[in-house]
């Protein structure tokens, strides 16, 4: 971790000088006050400068990379990790050989690694960062597949005039279905059942008929 010691008439002045030398912002560093400083008698006699140690924080993207690279090493997988901190989230991608073990059955492994990465990245952080992890493009393909499923199911509901219940899905995937159909004026969606069998039911908007569920 890059750090420097700096002095100034006050702690704030010493920190400001250190930030200029490091080329970092206050949010990107940790500050340790070594000496508060003293003005002395009449601001002259016995005056001591404030002294601080300013260290660059390990940033979110670097924390994510370090953690996932250690996981890859333990699992003996040949893969590369990239991480980009954007305004809305930290986007992390893993690409390589035999990465299916990280995805797991229906993405269960991917969700678990995303959760653990979030814990590592946000440990001790003042402002938590949302982590979005993808492995070999699985999440992007899955989102596209679920959005397509949502649209096709909505068309079936309209044609058959009755509700359709989709297969059980984790919460993150159910949310994709809900979002894909939220602006459709003819259908509504709702989640029903208990985990891990909770599923999305797509119904005609304003329908008063008894819902007939179908499993796809």
Image: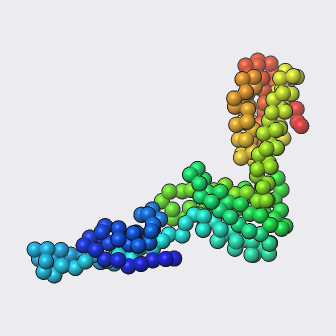
Which color scheme did the rendering employ for the protein? Answer: rainbow
Residue 56 appearing in the image: yes
The image position of residue 75, as x and y in percent, is: 78, 73
Residue 199 appearing in the image: no
Query: Which image quadrant is residue 162 in?
Result: top right
Which is nearer the eye, 44 or 22?
Answer: 22
- Quarter of the figure that contains the C terminus: top right
Q: Is residue 1 left or right of residue 11?
A: right
Decide: is 216 above or below 21: above
The image position of residue 80, as x and y in percent, is: 74, 68
Which is nearer the eye, 168 or 50?
Answer: 50
The image position of residue 176, as x and y in percent, is: 73, 41
Q: What's the residue at 44%, 72% (across, down)?
A: 22
Q: Is residue 78 left or right of residue 39?
A: right
Q: What's the residue at 75%, 22% (across, down)?
A: 186
Decide: is 130 above or below 102: above
Return the residue found at the far bottom: 46
Q: What's the residue at 71%, 66% (across, down)?
A: 81
Q: What's the residue at 80%, 18% (across, down)?
A: 209
Return the residue found at the far left: 42
Decide: is 188 above or below 101: above
Q: Is residue 155 left or right of residue 116?
A: right
Decide: is 117 above or below 188: below
Report the label total.
0
Query: Which image quadrant is residue 95 in?
Result: bottom right
Query: Which image quadrant is residue 167 in?
Result: top right
Which is nearer the eye, 73 or 209?
Answer: 73
């Amino acid at each position: 971790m890059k750090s420097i010691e700096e002095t100034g008439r006050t702690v704030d002045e010493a920190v400001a000088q250190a930030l200029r030398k490091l080329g970092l912002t206050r949010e990107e560093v940790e500050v340790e006050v070594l000496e508060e400083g003293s003005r002395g008698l009449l601001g002259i006699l016995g005056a001591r400068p404030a002294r601080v140690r300013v260290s660059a924080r390990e940033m979110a993207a670097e924390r994510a990379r370090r953690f996932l690279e250690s996981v890859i090493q333990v699992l003996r997988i040949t893969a590369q990790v990239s991480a980009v901190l954007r305004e809305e989230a930290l986007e992390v991608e893993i690409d390589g050989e035999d990465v299916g073990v990280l995805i797991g059955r229906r993405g269960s492994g991917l969700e678990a690694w995303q959760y653990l990465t979030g814990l590592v990245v946000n440990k001790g952080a003042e402002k938590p960062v949302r982590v979005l992890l993808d492995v070999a493009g699985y999440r992007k393909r899955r989102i596209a597949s679920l959005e397509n499923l949502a649209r096709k199911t909505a068309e079936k509901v309209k044609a058959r005039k009755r509700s359709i219940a989709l297969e059980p899905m984790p919460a993150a995937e159910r949310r994709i279905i809900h979002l894909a159909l939220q602006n459709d004026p003819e259908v509504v969606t709702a989640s029903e059942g208990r985990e891990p069998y909770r599923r999305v039911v797509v119904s005609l908007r304003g329908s008063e008929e008894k819902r007939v569920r179908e499993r796809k």
